[in-house]
Amino acid sequence: MNGPFADYKWAALARDWTVFGEGFAYTVLVSLGALLLALALGIVFGVLGSSKWKLARGISRVYVESIQNTPLVIQIFFLYHGLPHLGIMLPVFAVGVLGVGIYHGAYISEVVRAGIQAVPRGQIEAAYSQGFAFWGAMQHIVLPQAKRMAFPPMTNQAVSLIKNTSVMAMVAGGELMYQADSWSSTNLYYGPAYIATGLLYLSLCLPLATYARRLEQQSEVGA
Amino acid sequence: MKRFSAFLLCIIMVLGLFVVGCGTNKQAQSNQGDTAGDIKAIKDRGVLKVGVKVDVPKFGFKDPQTNKIDGLEIDIARAVAKKILGDANKIDVQGVTAKTRGPLLDNGEVDLVIATFTITEERKQSYNFSDPYFQDGVAMMVKKSSGIQSVKDMNGKKIGVAQSATSRKALQEEADKVGAKVQFLEFGTYPEIKTALDSGRIDVFSVDGSILAGYLDDTTTILNDRFAPQQYGVASKKSNAALAKAVDETIAEMKKSGELDKLVQKWGIK
């Protein structure tokens, strides 16, 4: 029996599972780093984007539009191949965290902005009347309420973020997709390789997506 | 209930993939019974479909000015077409990469792959390989400014190789011999490796010597060392035994008549 899914190809996969394990662990690490960065950027620029100062809104707009309207691949290529020509040699792990983190930060900032704008204006006015400054009012009054609105779409962003770390395969990133490409292009056992890789991504993303859906249902009931 | 149906959907998707896999296997088995079926299919179609490289000058290269793909490997494809169909022009070439050439053979999108495809024991399990039509060694390109002269200077250096390339293993062995610690980065295409060399992401660009020659420029140089003979073969789907035989005969005839040597000279390879 031969073909892309022949038994001995699965056996080879089982023998070399550490290659995929290594890539999987790397993908999880890059995703975590990128997610933290994306959340930080998303909250800062989301708050700026919903503030009353024109300049702050402008800065947030420039960030969001320039990142959302260029392909992630180009941003990664710039960080990996472009910056060294300017004398900045980032390690590939940093390229992954920065590239994917900044990319999804732009999307999360829009989610945060929408969440903040969904909180009634009276809330922040009441906070001001109690003596809160802008950032204090945001931190203690507005953001906790915005969180409920923003959380389900944010979790969906986390799912996209995990999947998007796979673009690192194009710059020898060492993550799951790269390892799958590397392993399967040497021995040409691409059938089992990509099924296993797909299942590994599924095992990361499906629980998150399910969680997001449940949060959404809860907030519907609560609202 | 919703969660259960989501779970069910996943199972069905995975099973679906297996069924696709088994389907191709069955087809493969039935083809083995009818040995000339593969040749007949090509004759009925009237054209030989060949996967070639489009980014390796002199072997398989798409000229950006004329948009024509030409090279030694296209000439070999023509010879095979002449043998099977009696007309050297009845070929339909399409570009393949290291990543796509296996799947394209398996799904029948191409009959043959002639794309600087190195013969290895592991690969022979999955595909038929003809006798080698060309032998090359792994070579290394470095920046002139790097001062690297040989493998001995490569301790702590980063080496860019192509995905699917056998050069990684060969170079690792050489580095081990002289006790140099090297790190490998794999890229999907040759231009990407060159870009990485230019940007300093890698110190050494290592693929087969003949491929490397196409990427030489003012700032780079190719070291004299050659490692691990790489033998290129024509690959076909494992079940297409009659086709593999026809290819083997063609290669043997071309070697005997000196036509193969002439072609290598025509393209100015070594």
Image (cartoon, coloured by chain):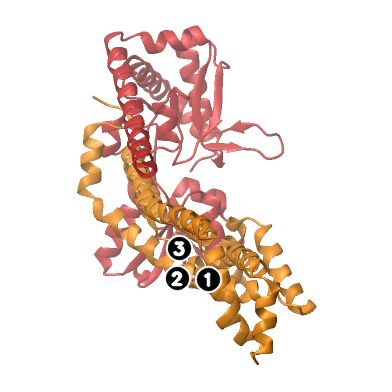
Per the image, the residue denoted by label 2 is: A33
Q: Is residue A175 above or below residue B252?
A: below
Picture coordinates of residue A201, whole percent (x, y): 39, 51
Q: Does B126 sit above or below residue A111?
A: above
Residue drawn at (27%, 67%), measured in percent from left and top?
Answer: B178
Please tell me which residue lies in front, A155 or B164.
Answer: A155
- Secondary-structure class at tag 3: strand
- Contact, mark 3 vs mark 1 (Cβ under 8 Å): no
Question: Along the horizontal axis of the image, is A137 left or right of B238?
Answer: right
Q: Specify the colour of chain B.
A: red
- Contact (Cβ within 8 Å) of mark 1 with mark 2: no
Location of residue B194 with respect to B59 vertically, above or below: below
Local crowd size for mark 2, using a 10 Å CA cut-off: few (<14), some (14–19), many (≥20):
some
Seen from the viewer's position, the closer of residues B1 and B180 is: B1
Residue B43 lies, in percent from the top left, at: 47, 8
- State the residue position of label 1: A39
For label 3, the residue is B204
Q: Chain of mark 1?
A: A
* Chain A colour as displayed: orange
Identify which amino acid the numbered label 1 is placed on: Leu
